[in-house]
Image (cartoon, rainbow, N blue to C red):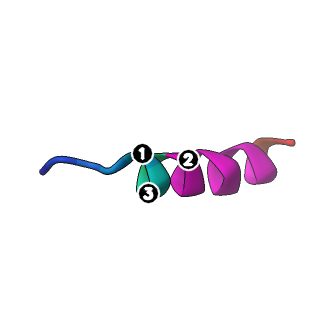
Amino acid sequence: HNVTQHEQTFRWNAYSGILG
């Protein structure tokens, strides 16, 4: 599965939001 930069950023923002 090749994750696009947009999807990767979106997931990271959500993940960071949960941690933060």
Amino acid type for the residue under numbered disc 3: Glu
Q: Tell me whether circle 3 and circle 2 mark residues in contact (CB < 8 Å).
A: yes
Q: Residue at x 42, y 45 (%)?
A: 5
Numbered range of the magenta stretch: 9-18
Q: Which residue is mark 3?
A: 7
Measure the C-alpha gap from mark 3 to mark 2: 5 Å
Q: Residue furthest front?
A: 5
**Which amino acid, by three-letter code, is at mark 2?**
Thr
Q: Secondary structure at mark 3?
A: helix
Tell me the CA gap for discs 2 and 1: 6 Å
User: Quick one: label 1, few (<14), some, or many (20+) residues within 10 Å?
Assistant: few
x 78%, y 42%: residue = 19
- Image quadrant for the C terminus? top right
Question: Helix, strand, or loop for circle 1?
Answer: helix
Point out which mark residue 13 bears.
none
Tag 2 near tag 1, CB within 8 Å: yes
Q: Which residue is mark 1?
A: 5
In this view, the residue in front, 19 or 14, is 14
x and y, in percent, of residue 12 in the image: 59, 45
Magenta region's main secondary structure?
A: helix
Could you say which disc has been placed on residue 9 in the image?
2
Contact check, label 3 and label 1, Cβ < 8 Å: yes
